[in-house]
């Protein structure tokens, strides 16, 4: 069982930065790939980024590539999403999720077994 708690969301002006954190409980966190997804009310949840269990492999949605950076510290059971050059269209609730993959990454929501409660990111123009 893995429990995930996101933090770091808030209100920021366009062009600004935020760093989201995803803190996990559970001794086997280092065996899970972790992904970030986001959702705007009335729209489907969309993939943002993911990182492999070891942290070696990362993948980004085209919409955030070059602006967002995902990383993890398995000693602290935490995954981070550094978001720079934020745009109003980045406004959403951001969720982290864990998938039981010892190797590789996935963008498929159904492969993520555990989800956090979400944190709101609002980017003003």
Image: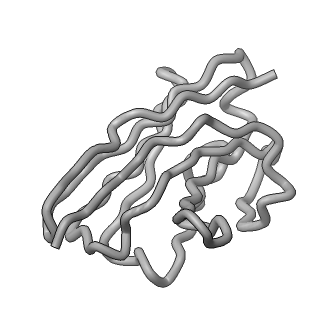
Q: Quadrant of the N terminus?
A: top right
Task: Looking at the picture, tell me which residue is in the foreground, 54 or 51.
Answer: 51
Outermost residue toward the front in this view? 42
Task: Looking at the picture, tell me which residue is in the foreground, 25 or 115.
Answer: 115
- Give the x, y percent position of residue 115: 69, 39
Residue positioned 49% across, 83% down in the render: 62
Residue positioned 45% across, 42% down in the render: 119
Task: Looking at the picture, tell me which residue is in the foreground, 77 or 3.
Answer: 3
Outermost residue toward the bottom in this view? 62
100 left or right, relative to 49:
right
Depicted 49 relative to depicted 64: above or below: above
Residue positioned 76% across, 37% down in the render: 114
Q: Quadrant of the C terminus?
A: bottom left
Q: Which colour scheme appears in the figure?
A: one colour
- Give the x, y percent position of residue 11: 22, 50
Task: Looking at the picture, tell me which residue is in the foreground, 40 or 23.
Answer: 40
Depicted 76 relative to depicted 37: above or below: above
Depicted 52 relative to depicted 90: above or below: above
Q: Report the number of discs.
A: 0
Residue positioned 32% across, 53% down in the render: 82
Depicted 62 relative to depicted 69: above or below: below
- Give the x, y percent position of residue 2: 74, 25
- Give the x, y percent position of residue 54: 62, 43
- Dividing the picture into quarters, in which one does residue 36 lie? bottom right
50 left or right, relative to 72:
right
């Amino acid at each position: 069982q893995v429990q995930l708690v996101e933090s770091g969301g808030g209100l920021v002006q366009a062009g600004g930065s935020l760093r989201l954190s995803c803190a996990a409980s559970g001794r086997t966190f280092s065996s899970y790939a972790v992904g970030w997804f986001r959702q705007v009310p009335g729209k489907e949840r969309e993939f943002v980024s993911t990182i492999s269990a070891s942290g070696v492999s990362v993948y980004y949605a085209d919409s955030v590539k070059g602006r967002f950076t995902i990383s993890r510290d398995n000693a602290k059971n935490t995954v981070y999403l550094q978001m720079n050059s934020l745009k109003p269209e980045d406004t959403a609730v951001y969720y982290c999720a864990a998938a039981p993959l010892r190797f590789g990454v996935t963008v498929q929501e159904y492969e993520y077994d555990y989800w956090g409660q979400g944190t709101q990111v609002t980017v003003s123009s």
